[in-house]
Image: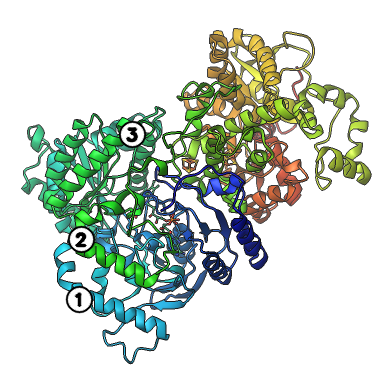
Amino acid sequence: MATTKAATNRGSAADSVLASRLARETSGDVFFDSFNRGRYATDASFYQIIPAGVVVPRTVDEALRTLAICRDAGRIVTPRGGGTSQCGQTVNDGIVVDVSKHLNRIISLDVENRRCVVEPGIVLDDLNRQLKMHGLWFPVDVSTASRATIGGMAGNNSCGGRSLRYGTMRDNTFAMDAALADGTLLHFGEVPRDLSTFNSEGSGRALFADMLALGEREAREIAERFPKVQRRVGGYNLDALVPSNTPNNMAHLLVGSEGTLAFTTQVELKLWPIIRNKLLGVCHFGSFYEAMNAAQHLVKLRPIAVELVDRTMLALGREIAMFQPIIKTAVRGDPDAVLIVEFAEEDQSDNIRRLKQLGELMADLGFGWDQPQRKWGGVVEIVEPALQIGVAEFRAAGLNVMMSMKQEGKPVSFVEDCAVPLPHLADYTERLNAVFEKHGTRGTMYAHASEGCLHVRPVLNLKLDKDVKAMRAIAEEAFALVREYKGSHSGEHGDGLVRSEFHETMFGPRIINDFAEVKQRFDPDNLLNPGKIVDPPKMDDRALFRYPPDYRVGALTTKLDWSAWPGAGGGFQGAVEMCNNNGTCRKLEGGVMCPSYRTTRNEKDVTRGRANTLRLAISGQLGAGALASDEMLDTLKLCVSCKACRHECPTGVDMAKMKIEVLAARVEKRGLTLHDRLVGYLPRYAGIAGRLAPLANLRNNSPLLRKLLERFAGISAGRTLPEWRRDVFMPSQEAIGPVDGREVVLFADTFNRAYERENLDDALRVLVAAGYRVHLPRPPDGNRALCCGRTFLSAGLVDDARAELDRLVIAYAPFAARGVPIIGLEPSCLLTLRDELLSLRSDDAARSVSAHALLIEEFLAREAEAGRLQLPLGPVAERALVHGHCHQKSFGAFPSVAKVLRLVPGLQVDIIESSCCGMAGAFGYGADTFDVSMEMAELSLLPAVRNAGPQTLIIADGTSCRHQIGDGTNRTALHVTRVLAMSLDRAQQNSNPTAVPKEPVHG
Ligand SMILES: Cc1cc2nc3c(=O)[nH]c(=O)nc-3n(C[C@H](O)[C@H](O)[C@H](O)COP(=O)(O)OP(=O)(O)OC[C@H]3O[C@@H](n4cnc5c(N)ncnc54)[C@H](O)[C@@H]3O)c2cc1C
Ligand code: SF4
Ligand code: SF4
């Protein structure tokens, strides 16, 4: 079996021969370096095994060639999709073959017969997006739908929250094509029991015949030992082979085999009509036990799901502002648990009838709003679709909050998906909680009550031997309970390294021998993902853990404050280790995270890959000096510091902040490049460049200078740089507007000041017109304007950034101390005050400045909501199309843009569903990042702008975003303040048609 080892570059001679051959005979990526191997050493389990190499095949043929080459070299192969397995299914030594990047097409679609054939690497959400236009979907709706692949779902026999209606992956798989370890490519589908006339390759026929014979021989044992719950996904599906299960489908044996029997090349799926109508009933219970007991009765109304949310999750949800209104509407009183019952019949009147019956059933079971605690309860009906979505999102977010614990102990997945027959659910959960308590831990239960499959993760610190022992004891005791109730210890997530060891006690020795026989028959040389299902290691073998006993992070010097987390580097270690590999950052649509992955689909370029690399680096597993190495720089190169992960990663991994540390370490070790200097020190030379504008702008008009700057400073010759100007924003007054007006401070950032003063002029005009007294505090140390330090941070010049912020805090703190809002225009600059400032300074003055920092649209929206905004506005256009800056989204500031724009009469405001614009400060100007920058923009932003009519206003508050839109579409994008100023002019013209538009208000 595999053992852990550091991901050193000292591969064996045999490995280098293998690597060369793979690189020669395939055209996809072949990685044998320590950084890439390290990135494929983990999945969403707590295990880690460094593979010998990684192959990312471009075609199915290349995948099969990889298999053949590895076989020749005697190397094992582990197929991998999204790598979101929770039980260690995808970790192994040998060669990992990642099918998610290239093998992700729909091969054929038969709408009429509701079938499709897909390659194994297609992501479920991606498949469903393509099916939607045909009114179809693939309903095995796993929570990881945004990154789980069909090959991985088949590998694990995955199940969705609605498996009550749709069943598991096995129930929705018609057939699979797959290669055996010896290279034989076979079609696995329905077979007759008499194979003599069956049209199959010789070896296939022999194999299938052997399997059917095994099914016949073991039918009685299988009937006796296989748990009779729908959610039994452990072991090989021998029940698919028994005579009573005709026609036998050989694909069903492959489903759930976790890459141990064959390498899947395509899967034929059963499709279903999409759900058009649904209604939810939120059943309330004063007692958790009663809720669990009720589940067996509620399912009789044939809902498609019954999902549990307990008291702890409700409490967590109540702390999240966006969920407060949902909980307020959907939850009554103070229940111990709620069961969310979902009806989704084609005919809505059926759903209405069932929802009514649900109320009656609850009453029949003795629940009532006027009953004492144990029988207190009833149903809150959720009819409105928006609220239904809100309820679903709330349940998901509750889990995320739970996962984001910053302490060393974390919720650990190992008994997380046991399934028991519904009549035993209440007793089982009660006894399981007692097991946790006995071992000094606790866990919150949630999810699929309708299946008797509740998710629960006891909180443990697997770096401690005592907690590892507790985990083992809990596993043994919990699985014993499951056996007692004739349930399945693996009800959703499969076996992997966590559960396979326990199969013998669940299935008995005879079935274990059968599993071994199947494995031997398919893969006699043990080449396909060994150690899973058959011949597993001990689940608590710490040598296989992500944090083995010798895991250490040495002393680390960090520049930013990481004290919210535990561990070395003032907590940097804990922040890095927050990544649990759940893979949310691999989503391809929705939200913003992670733009670089969406563009390249490389594990290196996703938040998870970066976090794993950092963890390996700080723990010495990538050799000395890894943190400041070229490979680390390459790992972070395409991270655009959009901060989307900080907001969207369920555990709050903040890669933009971590990148600053890496860049700082690198600058310290290697010094600055010319590129870093030009980017970082821009605020310091902006004044001179403005004064020498014609000279400074020469580069844009000279192909030679463009080339020279590309060669020596890495600035793409293909980019036009923003034009310097002499008339920079330089107010002569320190305050403008009515002296008795409500006070604000306007932060004039470097970019708007130097390149686009119109935005600041218009902001001033709007604020003054609305009656505010606008302060423009002078820098404490002379004439150079104030700066937030953003460019310095992006070059790793943390001390310089701190110096800039010190100046800014001195200037603004007196205003903040008396509650004056500090408002800014450029999201990346202003939000530095809310974010990095607090990582650099934690004193009262800094905290106060940070707490008062607002983007102008946040400020105006707040004023409007409070009824304080007196701004006469007139119509300017019929439609505005808005692109949000990533930092606006990360800090929840983006909705204010639309709110403010909607103050403009007659303006329809549409939001572009875009991720990062790709420019991201200096990123888009880099010669080596230009192409990726444009690809990011082309994902959705630029096509949306190109499709907009010429009269449509294009709005983008970020300087870089506006530049990118201009470069990519030749359209001018406007800051929101410009639209407000235009609207103000229009209102004034309307009230006085002879008036000319006002001159800017110059300070
Ligand atoms: C937060 C979270 C929530 C989850 N929720 C659910 C849930 O609701 N329901 C559920 O069922 N699971 C769930 N899971 C587990 C996991 O996401 C699913 O099992 C998922 O289907 C795995 O897909 P994947 O692409 O990541 O597969 P991987 O993890 O990459 O692979 C899974 C298995 O399939 C094998 N495999 C992959 N491709 C091939 C191939 N081409 N040929 C042969 N074998 C192959 C692998 O070797 C491995 O054994 C969850 C996991 C997490 C982290
Ligand atoms: S970075 Fe966040 S979203 Fe990505 S895998 Fe890690 S924990 Fe999940
Ligand atoms: S900051 Fe943005 S680009 Fe960087 S890892 Fe996070 S989501 Fe990806």
Q: Position of residue 878 (x, y in %)?
A: 61, 47
Query: Which mark is nearer the camera, 2 or 1?
Result: 2
**Which callout, 1 or 3, points at the residue further toward the start of the chain?**
1
Q: Amino acid at mark 2?
A: Pro
CA distance for labels 2 and 1: 15 Å
Neighbor class of circle 2 (other Cα within 10 Å; few <14, some 14-19, many 20+) is few
| Label 1 secondary element | helix
CA distance for labels 2 and 3: 45 Å
Which residue has dot 1 on it?
217
Residue sitting nearer the eye, 295 or 914: 295
| Label 3 secondary element | helix
Viewed as shown, does residue 333 lie left or right of 793? left
**Residue at the outermost bottom position:** 197
**Which callout, 2 or 1, points at the residue further toward the start of the chain?**
1
Q: Which mark is residue 934?
A: none
Q: Position of residue 508 (x, y in %)?
A: 19, 59
Which residue has dot 3 on it?
317
Which residue has dot 2 on it?
509
